[in-house]
Image: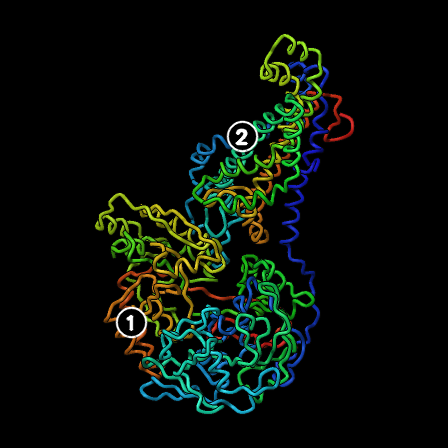
Amino acid sequence: MTAELITEAGAAPEAPARGRQVRRRLYADRMAMAGLVIAVVMVVAALAAPLLVHLEGQDATTYHPELLDSARGGVPRGSFGGAGGAHWLGVEPTTGRDLFARALGGARISFLVAFGTLIVQILLGVGIGLAAGLGGKVADAFLGRLIDLAISFPQLIFAIALLAIVPGTFPRPILLMMVIGLFGWGGTARLVRGQVLSLRTRDYVSAARLSGASRTRIALREILPGISAPLVTYAALLLPNNMISEAGLSFLGIGVRPPASSWGQMLSTATTWFQADPTYVLVPGLLLLVNVLAFTVLADGLRTALDPKAPSLRGGRR
Amino acid sequence: MRTSPALLATAALLAAATAACSSDGSSSSSSGSAAFDPKTCQGGTLYVLNQSDATSHHLDPARIYTSGGGSVTSLIFRTLTTRHRVPGQAGDQVVPDLATDTGKASDGAKTWTYHLKDGLKFDDGTPITSKDIKWGVERAFAPELPGGIPYLRDWLAGGTDYTGPYKGKELDSIQTPDDKTIVFKLRKPEGDFPYVATATQFAPVPKAKDNGTGYEKHPVASGPYKVQSHEQDKSLVLVRNPYWSRTVDDQRLACPDRVEGTYGLNAAVINQRLSASAGKDANAITVDTDLSPAELARISTDPNLKKRAVKGEFGETDYIAFNTKVKPFDDARVRQAIAYAIGRQSVVNAVGGSSLAKAATTFLPDQAAFGYQPYDYFPAGPNGNAAKAKELLAQAGHPNGLTITLAHRNADYNHDGPAVATAVQASLKQAGITVKLKPYDDAGYGDTIQKPSTEPGIFLATWGADWPTGGPFLAPIFDGRQILKEGGNFNASQLNDPKINAEFDAINKITDPVQARPRWGALDATIGKQALNVPLIHPIYIRLTGKNVKNAYLDQWRGSYDPAMVSVK
């Protein structure tokens, strides 16, 4: 997966695309704008979750047994899983907890872990990539192999193993960020290393070196701006992948612990209810789908805006 | 992969959808619905679809802990006595199996004598003798074969110091004056001894074929079927035991020629397969899975489904246990406050709703066989009485509420997992009690809660009837002499009241179970006043059969249908 993402991110452009040009191209791309709008709405909803839930007048942990048909297994009364004025997205079977509140709680976890993981991946990836690209032969050889190792690690299995042995008192979202990030920085590092290796032979970089700039200064002032475009695109694609990873781990039961809700965990319990209460599956399922789709489309739009010559994820003419 | 994030999510959703959809395409193959006739029912293969291994993982009769000989295990192992396999209340009775009667009591029920029937043989043709039964009971004491019922060590004279026969030592309290007679000498009177003799520990084991821990790979059968193969937690295949017949066994019909068990299946999938009854699933049953929500929703409107569902109750109580040696649970008012605060409706919903569980306010199950006497000393109503709970807490010196940690299993199949724990947490919150949840690994939970030194202050527990009388339901839980420091302790509250202990002894002298019933009920009501635990629910079993399965009547003892009595022809 990561290897293909790197080629999609495109080669370093001849010169950094100008901000206004990028923005204009982006605004003209309707799909990307749709993705951007949805993404922004989701993030805002997640940030404003406590306010929104307060507006609804519910909370994510109170049980409402009176809203359930106990004789039929605890399925919510009413159609669409009990959706209505009091509970905007219905209630959860067997508990009666408000689904809107739980779904928003899930959104918070999803974004928190996805963005947090992204930070870990960028920090580690850029740091190690820069060190490998700018360092001497020995450093590059060692770090290069380290990057290869990080990419080829069986992510999921090690994530599961690590999550299973850490004691329950350690805050789960932070643990998830660390674990997914720890096994996901390889792609970023390889991308950065590749870009740095090609950039360091450029005239302006040699000029900076000759004028006595330190390696750090070269890294920050000359190299980073040059790799910002492919890095931003790559990061934008990493985000939905992180969301899927978190959802997948929560689905397997090793993500956040109850009563905290996560979309993946909601999906896991909801599959048994597909026939009796489809709303319970559709709420986290559609939210996850729409979210990931929005960010993916946005990332593709960004990449095309930054480098129109690069092949689009969506294929065909733009 | 490339564009996958979005596609992956869609694909996953679709996969879940199709997996959850039942694939019944109006399969109305006439199942030759001739009435069931035991004389012509032989033939076919019975399939058992389970979430967990029906032999409690180990196929060694010394290690199996089940009630009345078990569902599937009773197909392989015959015991001295067994449960009465007839529909109705008579199903609670104990009847002879290998023995000629349910035992002769003498010496005030301290000695029990059994004679074996004629013509009994193992699956290799060797005759079954009383020495084989003695060997079977003795080896249950061996430390390398842990597990099984907790009564042998306490009941048999000399049991507490006995460590099994593998070093050459015999248990002298089991006597075999001849090949057909076996005599048990007990430490004190036990009127319920015929019931304990239904346990698989009383199945005969030939000493010549016993290789200790390896025996479970090829256990020798005394019942209608022998083991062809067993893959722990995966599958079990049974074929007919040629040396068994109905002439030597008047309790089992054993109609199918072959039994194939598949374990580790998902509960929803089991119900979908039984409900759709396509192909081989038409000959399938389950012995551990109740209806899933999808089937519960359809059962009242679909008469075909309703016909194939058997509803019953096994004597079981799921409850909150207290360790009274840990603060603040040493204070009765705190325990009473928790009893008042519990909203049982949420707990009932957590385990599947009112079709699959009912609220329990007594420790004994609400069935006549246990001598059930209704009581509700801390009336909480369906949603808890938070006001009364707060009042009691204030009296106990906690006017601003309390914070406690509730231990529970990290799986839901046994009704002591996260679903029930979260429901308890939500109820107690309304009474100002903040509950932190502490999940324990499924494999280690039993060991942790059954040892007084590691026992948490408050935890979820379940207790089932080893046989349908009040004795085994109350004694391991409330008899002070049953507190076991090394493990296998079920007296969580560590109650040791000489008056209550004496009452246990007095009732154990009664050999007529019907006479003992009111005494057990009264004892439960007396102990209940102390709020030593908080009963939550009694489960109800509703289990489906495939559409070809016949004679699946309710077995009163076990609460569901009996694999030894069903047929697929």
From the viewer's perspective, tell me whether residue B352 is left or right of residue B337: right
Of badges 1 and 2, the one in the foreground is 1
**Tag on residue B523?**
1
Foreground pick, B281 / B483: B483
Circle 2 SS class: helix
**Dot 1 and dot 2 within a common chain:** no
Circle 1 SS class: helix
The answer to which quarter of the image holds residue A117 is: top right
x, y (%) of residue B202?
47, 79
x, y (%) of residue A208?
64, 10
Identify the residue position indicated by label 2 in the image.
A43
Foreground pick, B258 / B219: B219
Check the image and tell me how it is coloured.
rainbow
Is residue A33 in view? no
The answer to which quarter of the image holds residue A294 is: top right
Position of B288 relative to A177 (above/below): below
Position of A171 relative to B36 (above/below): above
Say what amino acid the circle numbered 2 marks: Val
